[in-house]
Amino acid sequence: MPTIKLNRENVTTALLIIYLLGIVIFMVVRNISITPDRFFVFLLIGAVIAGRGISFLRDWLPFVALLLGYEMLRGFAATTSFKVHIEDIVAAERLLFFGNTATEFLQDLFYRPERVSWYDIAASVIYFLHFPLPLIVGFFLWLRRKAEYYKFVTALLLLSFAAFLTYLLFPAAPPWYAANVGALNGVYKIINLTIDQIGWTWNLSSYYSQLNPNPVAAIPSLHSAYPVLVFLALRRYSQRLAWVFSLYPILVWLAIVYTGEHYVVDIIPGVIYALVAYYLVYHFTQVKNFVRLRLRPLR
């Protein structure tokens, strides 16, 4: 585990991470959607401040381009001709929770449509941190240990495109969608309602405003998968950092279930996808050797 020393590199890294966290807070307060294309500009500014602007463009442009490509393809997956899974997902969730769904339970317990609670805002903010978090962690790894950065972004892209293929072949509706078609009762899309009630808007970048949304991309939940991959990547770098971060995935899972964006049965595949992507990338040599042994012809 790396030791923390008060040297120029550590101070620079800390200041840049504080700068990026400040940008996130600023964008949330000013109601600016934190999309990868926008956040990339702030990452570039940070890299220039660190005197590594050219290196940043070389290392980050392919990754961000592929990530934006995934976002474009995710919208195309909404046009699939495969049957949208609604009732069977509700049935699976109710089987898991003895006749109820976790979203129904949490919203019945906590949500009040006539007012906005602090935890409604907190859950919405956590939902919006879906992209900034892995980008900040990727930037941290890029500053500190490039080999770990390359592994992390490769695993993130593998995870994202594997999810896209699943959305294409197995479109699955989230709880709010099921409520809209009558498959669930008393479930609200809390994030949209919270945004409307506090006067926020979906202030998207020009790129994202042109993308097709995909309302049936629930399984696997990348909102649940990305924090798990981040935790595993941080654990490789420093177990101390990983354990500081360890509660965050749980907060994300609670937020996306409470707000009606995902079921628990969406979260489980998301965690599995993250574990598989991590293992395939970070333990590629072991995987390759295992496959080679399994495919070796019998003598």
Image (spheres, rainbow, N blue to C red):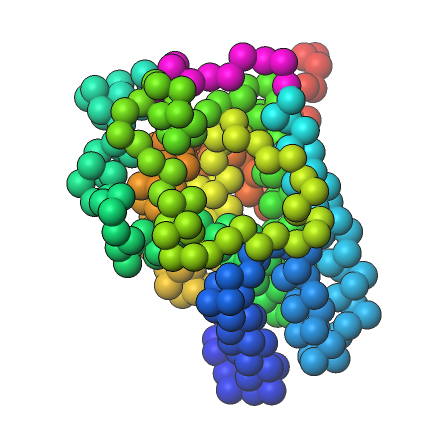
216 horizontally vs 94: left or right: right
- Seen from the viewer's position, the closer of residues 233 and 165 is 165
Q: Quadrant of the C terminus?
A: top right
* Residue 61 quadrant: bottom right
- In this view, the residue farthest toward the bottom is 7
Examine the rendered structure and indicate whether residue 176 appears above or below residue 231: above
Q: Residue at x 77, y 72 (%)?
A: 53
- Seen from the viewer's position, the closer of residues 32 and 10 is 32
* Residue 190 quadrant: top left
Q: Residue 54, image x and y in percent?
A: 81, 70
Is residue 96 at all visible to an observer of this figure?
no
Q: Residue at x 63, y 61 (%)?
A: 39
Q: Residue at x 38, y 57 (%)?
A: 198
Examine the rendered structure and indicate whether residue 276 appears above or below residue 229: above
236 horizontally vs 239: left or right: right
- From the image, give the main secondary structure of the stretch colored magenta: loop
Magenta stretch bounds: 80-90
Examine the rendered structure and indicate whether residue 85 appears above or below residue 97: above
Q: Residue 136, image x and y in percent?
A: 56, 62
Q: Residue at x 55, y 84 (%)?
A: 11
Is residue 113 at all visible to an observer of this figure?
yes
Q: Residue 94, image x and y in percent?
A: 27, 21
140 horizontally vs 254: left or right: right
- Seen from the viewer's position, the closer of residues 276 and 115 is 115
Q: Residue 51, image x and y in percent?
A: 74, 80
Residue 86 painted magenta:
yes
Residue 133 painted magenta:
no
146 horizontally vs 120: left or right: right
